[in-house]
Amino acid sequence: MSSELFQAINLLEEEKGIDKEVLLEALEAALISAYKKNFKSANNVSVLFDEEKGAMDIYAQKTVVEEVEDEQEEITLEEAREINLQYNIGDIVEIEVTPKNFGRIAAQAAKQVVTQRVREAERGIIFSEYQDREDDVMTGIIQRVDPNYVYVDLGKIEAKLAKQEQIVTEEYHVHDRIKVYVTKVENTNKGPQIYISRSHPGLLKRLFEMEVPEIYGGIVEVKSISREAGDRSKISVYASDEEIDPVGSCVGPKGQRVQAVVDELNGEKIDIVEWSEDPVIYVSNALSPSKVLKVIVDEEENSTTVIVPDYQLSLAIGKRGQNARLAAKLTGWKIDIKSETVAREEGLLRDEDTFFDSEEVKEDEEDDFLLDL
């Protein structure tokens, strides 16, 4: 075995970051396999590498016995003591059995197996590098587009953006830079696979973390997100410090922070509302930009009946029921919306009722409204 092979192994370790021991183990396995196949050896062989001399030797391991029954696996005590007088019955003797013409066969076998192990090791390095990126946002470059997938180059690996993870209103073009949310990283037989999304609610959360220092620093907490990707989303935020305005923090000066998120999502409308443990306040906030007169809570059914002014009914429900649907998903409460007139007819609203007023909870109500920027 020439010294050039060891130099190549050292080079692979430096350039590709593959552990030298991994490569030597692969080489050893290849050489043993080649020896057994071509010289009909038993299973008792090992390989000894001498990197300084650039050499490799094959050794057969034989058990010391009184009478030999299998010459490939056994050796007599007399023969063993010709090698070393310290051997006794039952000891294992290693005898060099390297064939003179073994070099060419070994080289062929080593090339195939080492190439395979190098590929496996490279895959392992890539997987370890990307497995910590799960639930994170990465920026990539679109390489190609077909009817089912958008192929995104993320550096050392190409990820596929499936059709169901795309935003219907978006167009994807080759060479465009794009931010994607990593939903899952797997190490498969075909190598590491990264699953990405543009429609996942996690993308919205991570984008706000990138734009809002208070969220990144934990001062403001994102409690919940409901999203209909490409059209409209709602996000509820909370700050334990009463002096911190969680909604205002997300909006930013002159709406700059939320505008950056909207731009990244190509105009997707975003409601930012304040979370509350009181379902009356929370549900009312979630239905912004509509005003709410009263919220009736049924905790057993996990449902609410929300009464709004007649002129606010369509706004509260939203186009094709979108506003109410997103609010229900955001809060986790079923929401049944009734107009003031219908509520009075059903006896749900009386003249002496004190109407819920979201302005009592938050003076600047405009920040809770739809940010259609």
Image (tube, rainbow, N blue to C red):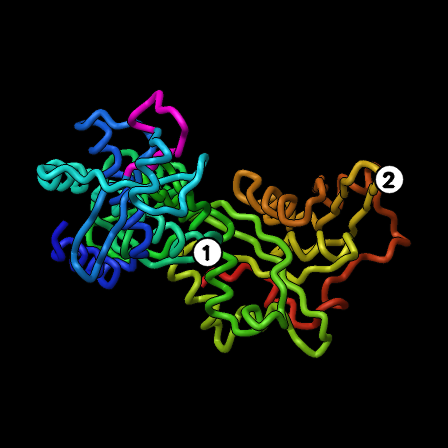
Rendering quarter of residue 69: top left
Looking at the picture, which amino acid does disc 1 mark?
A: Asp
Q: Position of residue 228 (x, y in %)?
A: 49, 45
Q: CA distance from mark 1 to mark 2?
A: 56 Å
Looking at the picture, which amino acid does disc 2 mark?
A: Gly
Rendering quarter of residue 67: top left
Foreground residue among 210 and 307:
210
Badge 2: residue crowd in 10 Å (few <14, some 14–19, many ≥20): few
Q: Which residue is mark 1?
A: 132
Q: Is residue 373 above or below residue 173?
A: below
Rendered-image quadrant of the C terminus: bottom left
Q: Which residue is mark 2?
A: 347
Magenta-drawn segment: 60-73
Residue 236 horizontal side relative to residue 48, left or right: right
Q: Is residue 334 visible?
A: yes
Residue 198 horizontal side relative to residue 148, left or right: right
Foreground residue among 27 and 257:
27
Could you tell me which secondary element the residue under label 1 belongs to? helix
Badge 1: residue crowd in 10 Å (few <14, some 14–19, many ≥20): few
Foreground residue among 301 and 160:
160
For the residues bearing labels 1 and 2, Cβ distance under 8 angstroms:
no
Q: Is residue 348 magenta?
A: no
